[in-house]
């Protein structure tokens, strides 16, 4: 069985979990306190980051590289489209969420509100929290614009771009930091994607000291 070293509210870990689950790859989840810099974990990934996946006798790190490996070795069901142009758009949006969205929103809200407490780094920086709360509005509006033109974020089929976005938004939803009333299109998209069987384990996540809102695991909000 595959083994994934992860933390529950890491969007990068969640993206890998969604890919594995969508491909129906059974995986053992091992929660890793990467900030403790355990020597065994550092041998698996000298970068000291999660996710780390053991699959096919290999130890793999970096979420995008892992997801592309899974896609290439388990192409059904497809999470990448057929044409180079369409694949480019998926990769562009994955980078958007894992880079820009992560820097402007996830790191300012989830990391400040949750990670600092869990890792013993002190209290949230209110300046960062305010910046994240402001920035997410822009990103939700951009997602709404995309969904006004497409069935899914990158086109007419669900792709890794949708999983990347949902991975970030689900961590924010866990701490009630998403205004789902801002866009009906985004809310409908998220309801559709979190209703997939691949999302079940993520909706069951529990972080000690932090209780999700009642709508978190409600497929109909």
Image: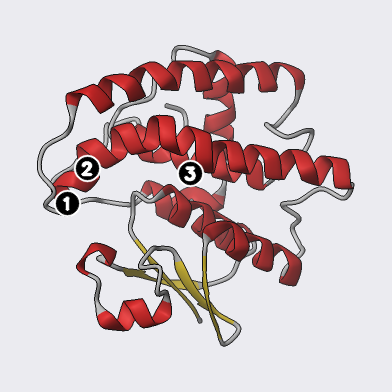
User: Outermost residue, bottom direction?
Assistant: 57
**Mark 3–mark 1 distance (CA, rounded to whole Å):** 19 Å
Name the quadrant of the C terminus: top left
Is disc 3 placed on a helix, strand or loop?
Answer: helix
Indicate whether 71 appears above or below 101. below
**Looking at the picture, does residue 108 appear above or below residue 201?**
above
- Nearest the eye: 220 or 86: 86
In this picture, residue 189 sits left or right of residue 111: right
- Element type at marker 2? helix
Q: Position of residue 28 (x, y in %)?
A: 42, 74
Which of discs 2 and 3 lies nearer the camera? The answer is 2
What residue does disc 3 label?
167
Q: Mark 2 or mark 3: which comes first in sequence?
A: 2
Between the residue at mark 2 and the residue at mark 1, the CA separation in whole angstroms equals 6 Å
Instruction: Mark 2 and mark 1 in contact? Answer it, CB < 8 Å.
Output: yes
Q: Which mark is residue 114?
A: 2
Q: At which x and y percent is residue 82?
A: 87, 50
Q: Quadrant of residue 42?
A: bottom left
Task: Tell me what residue is drawn at x 47 percent, y 12 percent.
Answer: 182
Give the alpha-carbon distance from disc 2 to disc 3, as whole Å.
16 Å
Q: Secondary structure at mark 1?
A: helix
Residue found 34% across the figure and 49% down from its top:
9
> Looking at the picture, does residue 137 appear above or below residue 50?
above
Image position of 140 (left or right of 82): left
Disc 1: CA contacts within 10 A as few (<14), some (14-19) or many (>=20) = some
Q: Position of residue 164 (x, y in %)?
A: 56, 44
The residue to which callout 1 is attached is: 118
Residue 158 seen in the figure:
no
Residue 156's quadrant in the figure? top right
């Amino acid at each position: 069985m595959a083994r994934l070293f992860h933390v529950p509210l890491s969007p990068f870990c969640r993206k890998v979990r969604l890919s594995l689950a969508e491909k129906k790859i059974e995986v053992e989840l091992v929660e890793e306190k990467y900030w403790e810099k355990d020597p065994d974990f550092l041998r698996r990934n000298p970068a000291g980051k999660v996710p780390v996946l053991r699959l096919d006798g290999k130890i793999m790190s970096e979420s995008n590289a892992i997801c592309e490996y899974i896609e290439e070795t388990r192409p059904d069901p497809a999470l990448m489209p057929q044409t180079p142009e369409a694949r480019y758009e998926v990769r562009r949006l994955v980078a958007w969420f894992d880079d820009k969205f992560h820097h402007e929103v996830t790191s300012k809200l989830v990391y400040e509100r949750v990670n600092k407490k869990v890792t013993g780094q002190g209290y949230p920086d209110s300046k960062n929290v305010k910046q994240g709360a402001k920035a997410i509005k822009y990103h939700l509006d951009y997602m709404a614009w995309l969904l006004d033109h497409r069935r899914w974020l990158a086109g007419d089929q669900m792709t890794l771009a949708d999983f990347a976005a949902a991975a970030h938004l689900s961590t924010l939803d866990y701490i009630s930091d998403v205004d789902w009333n801002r866009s009906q299109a985004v809310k409908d998209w998220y309801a559709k994607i979190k209703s997939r069987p691949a999302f079940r384990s993520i909706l069951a996540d529990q972080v000690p000291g932090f209780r999700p809102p009642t709508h978190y695991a409600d497929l109909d909000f």
